[in-house]
Image: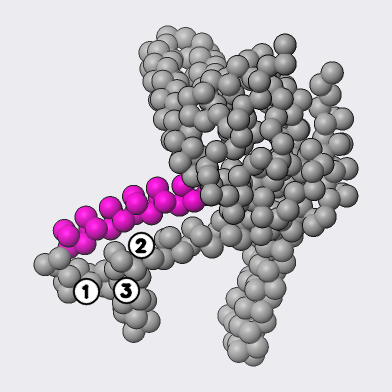
Amino acid sequence: MYNRAQLKQEVKQTIAVTKPRPMWVALLYLVIASIGASLIQGILGSLAGTSFLGSMMSDLMMSGKDIEEAIGELLLVYADRIYSFVGTLISTSLLSSILITLWQGLMNVGFNGYCLSLVREEKPAVTRIFCGFPLFGKVILTSLLVWVFTTLWTLLWAVCLIVVVAIAALLMEAVPVVGVLLILVGYIGFFALIFWTYFRYAMTNYILLDTGKYGLEAISESKRMMKGRKWKFFVLQISFIGWYLLLYAVILVGCIILGVVIGIGAAGVATGISSIGAIGGMVGGAVFVLILILAVVYLISMWLQPYITGCVAKFYLFFQPQEPVAESAWPTLGDTTTTVAEEPTDSK
């Protein structure tokens, strides 16, 4: 019988005994995903000329010009090419967004696969985070379909919300209380339906990796699997709220401390007493606090990444629609084919 507390405890125990530590694998995953996104953005930015313009903008502002003057001078220099530049900027930005989304989607599928092996206690290798790459075509097609369906459902819910708000606005003068309640109910319903939409497709990546199904077949399997279980999945997701609040608390406290450090430094500069020392202390203290905040946030995130994803993978294992394929049949970077394995036949 499904037990959320037991599921989370089992994932914690598995993480505690797994080598290499899942938190370091999560760090590697986050770093590679971030570096890849930065490289894509940097390369396309260089091709579009945004890096060069950014450098020129910085030089102009360092020379004493304010931002309006710097932009005006750049517009004068490039007035004859402004339309082509804007067009190039828009197209490269769109291409950059698409490529970054694809890259992060592949890495996300790989980390899902790692966590699925983790909770099965298969002692996955670090390279398991790349298991989505041999399935490039299947992952892209499936992710694209999920995005399309999610977007269409979201647009439908948005239209419904607009209708509800419009009705509430008409009622606001005659019956203000009813109008306010209607708006409140509309927004609650909107976000509830957004969650419902997301939960329908939540198991798609695991089904793709675990059974070889992809596209509409994997999406349909996910919908069947989540039918009647969305509330359980919602409760599982909301049970991590304490960790998210901890992250926000760390960031909030850090920002307050950072503000105090900068304020003290600014006060020292304003008094004119040892202004150089005050500026140095302010900068040094601000950098130290900032590094400390980032370190704590990353440490918590490194723990949460395999823990939360592992719990979702464990949820999938508990309700999986059929017998999974062996991990040895999963794709790796060394595979020459993109197929996972033949689907297991019914033993009946």
Q: Earlier in the sequence, mark 3 or mark 2?
A: 2
Question: Which labelled disc corresponds to residue 73?
Answer: 1
What is the distance, in whole Å, between disc 1 and disc 2 at their CAs?
24 Å
Query: Which x, y percent locates residue 110?
Result: 61, 46
Magenta span: 82-107
Is 235 positioned to the left or the right of 104 in the image? Answer: right
Q: Secondary structure at mark 2?
A: helix
- Observer able to see residue 184: no
What is the distance, in whole Å, between disc 3 and disc 2 at their CAs?
12 Å
In the image, residue 157 sits, relative to residue 112, either above or below, namely above
What is the distance, in whole Å, between disc 1 and disc 3 at their CAs?
15 Å
Disc 1: CA contacts within 10 A as few (<14), some (14-19) or many (>=20): some
- Choose top left, top right, bottom left or bottom right for residue 58: bottom left
In the image, residue 324 sits, relative to residue 48, either above or below, namely above
Query: Which x, y percent locates residue 338?
Result: 52, 42
Compare residues 288 and 103 and report the one nearer the observer: 103
In the image, residue 255 sits, relative to residue 191, either above or below, namely below
Residue named by callout 2: 44
Residue named by callout 3: 52
User: Dividing the image into 4 quarters, which one contains the C terminus?
Assistant: top right
